[in-house]
């Protein structure tokens, strides 16, 4: 492939996905009529959460990464985010409930055991005070009366999915060794507005599979090591815009958005067409049963299996990685989003591993095949296009883009109804008086005009102290 142009698919092509993933997307699309990109993102997040506790991936360079993913999906209200997420979370919640039930007796015993121990501690502490008052050394007294000994072990935390959680709660859930959880929500504003998003650097460390030590004053300090965290959030545009507007420099500078696979699928509202016979006669996907089977085979005492690349898959991944590197250059495709591009090949390797795991099932031999990596490259290219569209120079998730779109649509509607100045020119002052409410603000209107003008989508002229504007015909 020539390196002169980075190929970006206009939309995610389900036929480029592995059959098990394609069938899952199609099954849920027929049931919900939600955008297929939204469905895929939900399925990808659930798959990463299911696989991350058992598998890692070794890239052709020799670096080993988790298969965890950060997936962010922007979608309007009414796109059936909850229904879609519930579908793919079902097998995970089944496993979660099974693990809690397995340890149910221990869960019931622990509170009573802890109360008995705490009472014994109070009695022991009294004896320590008495001994010290009689001249016994503090350390000797504590040793004699067994302070902090025989504390009952807390039952293991079996919770897997966390939604409305602070970073402290997420880290607490991961403390110890080899914990695996998912921060998953179809109302991502709950998370993006919480204190989780204020500690993005810690989330980045968890994406890498690194260790974190947490120092606390009022509670015991603890460490997190060899943990795995997948994030899969869906948020409305306004919520996401507020998040990046409030923390844009932090989210970009610290690398959180660079690690995230972000998309803003085109809405299907107004074009959804249910067909009863299609739903009744459709083929059922094996993805959910596969996810549940993978998770039920988890054994914390076993080492994670690091999947490697077959020879032809390695060549394909290296070629893709070199292509991405080339386009980091000045005035090339990734020149404005080098942060995202620097993590893209890593993300593609993770996606390829997930595709291989779910596609191979019991036949998996530890190698990522060419088909899986080619599918992952297609997904990576599409997410790259989405990132450039949303966060590049045009920044289509920005407030200025929203205002510009509002102005462009207003002018188009007026022109179609012949309610405009001669030759399609509008006086800016009239838009301030009679335009959409958001544009009856000078700062907002100026931002919209500047954005469209910079994109070559608006002509601006000044005559007699008046500013008039006209849509360019290509818009």
Image (tube, rainbow, N blue to C red):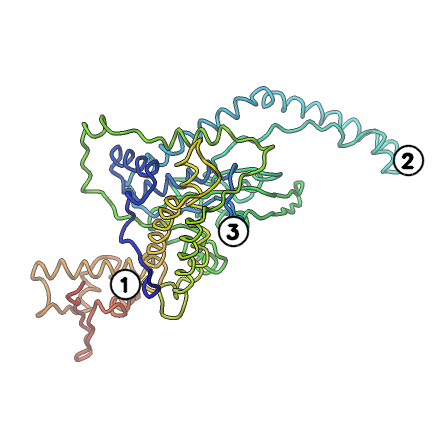
Crowd around label 3: few <14 · some 14–19 · many ≥20 (10 Å):
many
Label 1, secondary structure: give it. loop
Separation (CA) of disc 3 from disc 2: 50 Å
Circle nearer the viewer, 1 or 2:
2
Query: Mark 1 touching mark 2, by CB under 8 A?
Result: no
In front here: 409 or 358?
358
In the image, residue 383 sits, relative to residue 84, either above or below, namely: below
- Residue 204 is labelled as 3
In the image, residue 458 sits, relative to residue 244, either above or below, namely: below
Label 3, secondary structure: give it. helix
Q: Quadrant of residue 372?
A: top left
Q: Which residue is drawn at 42% across and 33% down?
A: 361
Circle nearer the viewer, 3 or 2:
3
- Residue 200 is labelled as none
Separation (CA) of disc 1 from disc 3: 39 Å
Circle nearer the viewer, 1 or 3:
3
Q: Quadrant of residue 426?
A: bottom left
Separation (CA) of disc 1 from disc 2: 77 Å
Label 2, secondary structure: give it. loop
Q: In what quadrant of the picture does the N terminus appear?
A: bottom left
In front here: 420 or 104?
104
Left or right: 245, with 431 as reference point: right
Q: Quadrant of residue 134?
A: top right
Left or right: 174, with 46 as reference point: right
Between disc 1 and disc 3, whose residue precedes?
3
Provide the residue designation for mark 1. 441
Residue closest to the far right: 135
Provide the residue designation for mark 2. 136
């Amino acid at each position: 492939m020539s390196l002169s142009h980075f190929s970006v698919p206009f939309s995610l092509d389900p036929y480029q996905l592995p059959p098990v993933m394609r069938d899952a997307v199609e099954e849920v699309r027929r049931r919900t009529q939600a955008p297929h990109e939204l469905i895929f993102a939900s399925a990808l997040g659930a798959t990463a959460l299911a696989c991350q506790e058992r598998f890692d991936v070794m890239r052709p360079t020799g670096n080993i990464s988790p298969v965890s993913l950060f997936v962010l999906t922007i979608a309007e209200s009414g796109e059936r985010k909850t229904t879609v997420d519930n579908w793919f979370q079902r097998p995970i919640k089944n496993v979660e409930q099974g693990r809690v039930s397995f340890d149910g007796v221990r869960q019931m015993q622990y509170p009573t055991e802890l109360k008995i121990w705490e009472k014994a501690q109070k009695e022991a502490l009294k004896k320590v005070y008495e001994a010290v008052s009689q001249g016994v050394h503090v350390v000797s007294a504590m040793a004699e009366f067994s302070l902090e000994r025989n504390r009952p072990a807390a039952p293991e935390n079996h919770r897997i999915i966390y939604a409305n959680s602070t970073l402290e709660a997420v880290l607490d859930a991961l403390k110890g060794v080899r914990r695996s959880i998912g921060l998953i929500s179809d109302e991502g504003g709950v998370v993006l507005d919480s204190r989780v998003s204020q500690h993005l650097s810690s989330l980045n460390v968890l994406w890498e599979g690194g260790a974190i030590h947490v120092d606390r004053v009022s509670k015991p300090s603890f460490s997190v090591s060899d943990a795995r965290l997948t994030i899969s959030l869906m948020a409305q545009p306004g919520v996401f815009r507020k998040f990046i507007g409030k923390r844009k420099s932090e989210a970009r500078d610290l690398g959180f958005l660079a690690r995230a696979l972000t998309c803003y699928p085109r809405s299907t509202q107004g074009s959804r067409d249910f067909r009863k016979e299609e739903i009744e006669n459709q083929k059922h996907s094996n993805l959910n049963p596969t996810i549940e089977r993978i998770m039920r085979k988890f054994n914390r005492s076993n080492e994670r299996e690091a999947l490697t690349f077959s020879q032809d898959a390695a060549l394909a991944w290296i070629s893709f990685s070199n292509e991405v590197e080339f386009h980091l250059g000045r005035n090339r495709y990734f020149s404005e989003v080098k942060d995202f591009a620097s993590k893209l090949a890593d993300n593609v390797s993770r996606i390829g591993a997930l595709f291989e795991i779910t596609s191979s099932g019991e036949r998996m031999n530890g190698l990522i095949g060419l088909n899986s990596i080619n599918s992952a490259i297609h997904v990576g290219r599409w997410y790259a296009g989405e990132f450039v569209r949303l966060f590049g120079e045009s920044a289509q998730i920005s407030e200025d883009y929203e205002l510009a779109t509002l102005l462009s649509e207003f002018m188009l509607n007026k022109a179609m109804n012949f309610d405009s100045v001669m030759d399609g020119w509008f006086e800016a002052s009239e838009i301030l008086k009679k335009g959409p409410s958001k544009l009856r603000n000078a700062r907002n209107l100026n931002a919209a005009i500047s954005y469209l003008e910079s994109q070559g989508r608006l002509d601006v002229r000044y005559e007699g102290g008046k500013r008039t504007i006209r849509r360019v015909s290509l818009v």
